[in-house]
Amino acid sequence: MIAKFSFMEEWKEYHIGDICESVSETYRKKSDMVVLVNTSDILDGVCLNHSYVENKDLKGQFKKSFRKNDILYSEIRPANKRFAYIDFDPTDYIASTKLMVIRSSDLVRPRYLYHYLKRKELLDELQALAESRSGTFPQITFSELALFEIRLPSLEMQDKIIAAIDAFENKIALNNRINHNLEEQAQALFKSWFVDFEPFKGSDFVDSELGLIPEGWRVGTLSELGDIVAGGTPSKTKPEYYTNNGIAWLTPKDLSVKCNKFTARGEIDITEDGYKNSSAKLMPRGSVLFSSRAPIGYISIAKGDICTNQGFKSVVPTYAGTAYLYYWLCENTEAIEAQASGSTFKEASGSLMRSFPALVPEKSVIDSFEKELSPILNEQEILEEEINHAEQIRDSLLPRLMSGELVMNC
């Protein structure tokens, strides 16, 4: 239960550097197999990579060892949430030198420090600091992080705050696990139907440029499956085109931090006049959003009417449904990227997307697949909504609990 702050609990002021350290213990073991953890291998509290590789000819950046209850924290672009709390025994894991390995002192619970370091307010300040520095990437150092202030209650109170926040974290983790299992089922169904053709093995097959395919199917183009829609940006000189409560307007950056399978909001919304008087196009619920540059391959499904900027070549279902288009794009992203071009950065152009070879099954087969996948997609959307709600409550409570505005009753 949460109650208003009581002055019975004493809080003390520290600098972050007073209660933890950035350790640089070099990995020196000679194990045959190791796990390499780069900045891209951690996100929003979780270590994503647990795959062992041979311990030879490793890139020079992989040097740091770390322990259970350490915090990995990226020096680059803090707002991208590339951090993780290590809640497992990381035997033979090696971290990149671009990751701080933060270890708590006896003054603070490691999990409490982790929750403090992931607060949006702190991340925003660190991002602004990183962007103020010259260099290739917006970057921070531990010496800069160490100067930030933190207020600490007793260890007993820290434990109560951890328990309150982790109740939401556990709900989020549970939903993510269920969603992951559902995603594996959906991907397996797509592969079974449209890669291995298992439900059609008793039928006749014909040769095609993609190999043998069931008779009655053909190889066409992506534009035959759905309308390819390029994004656009309303005029920057007309601030009235932008609003906090209009049509969602998405950029690849919105998906780079957290690429949900279903997307309802970007960082910015636009007005009806904003998209009607620009090259931005309004797309309906169920459109499959595909980032076509910087980078190529973020994929999401629109939960409602949405617009995107020029970084997208999205697909509005016509012949095919949302599920087929979504998993077809997932299956073919690498092939699309291989044909992308550009001098500054690679881009999958509209002409490339429209003419890209695509398997066109019989309409009855696509309709059956959509019917089969519909319960899975609906359940995933509900689970994501619950995750988003839990995250909003957690993020609202976290700064209030850690400032002492709210405390936990016994």
Image (cartoon, rainbow, N blue to C red):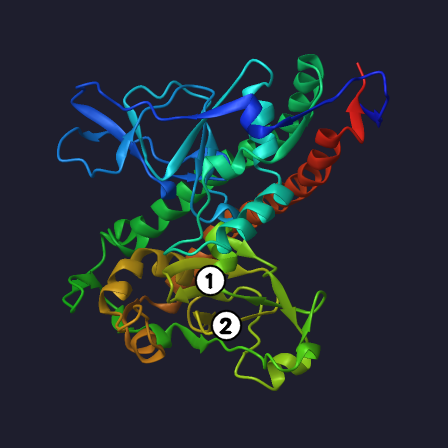
Residue at the spot 37% in from the left edge and 59% down from the top edge:
297
Please state the horizontal and vertical placement of residue 383, each as a whole percent of the image: 59, 42
Disc 2, SS: loop
Neighbour class for label 1 at 10 Å: few (<14), some, many (≥20)? many
Left or right: residue 41 versus residue 87 is left
Please state the horizontal and vertical placement of residue 209, each as a whole percent of the image: 15, 69
202, above or below 308, in the image: above
* Nearest the eye: 139 or 277: 139
Residue type at mark 1 is Pro
347, above or below 46, in the image: below
* Nearest the eye: 55 or 198: 55
Left or right: residue 237 versus residue 94 is right
Q: Quadrant of residue 4?
A: top right
Residue at the spot 64% in from the left edge and 41% down from the top edge:
391
Mark earlier in primary sequence (1, 2) = 1
125, above or below 66, in the image: below
Do we see residue 259 in this rendering?
no
Mark 1–mark 2 CB contact (< 8 Å): yes
What quarter of the picture does the C terminus occupy?
Answer: top right
Left or right: residue 410 versus residue 64 is right
What quarter of the picture does the N terminus occupy?
Answer: top right
Do we see residue 310 in this rendering?
yes
Residue at the spot 16% in from the left edge and 61% down from the top edge:
212
Residue under pointer 2: 309
Could you say which disc has been placed on residue 252 in the image?
A: 1
Spatial CA distance of label 1 from label 2 is 8 Å
Please state the horizontal and vertical placement of residue 244, each as a whole percent of the image: 71, 65
Task: Please count the marks in the image.
Answer: 2
* Nearest the eye: 358 or 329: 329
Disc 1, SS: helix
Residue type at mark 2 is Asn
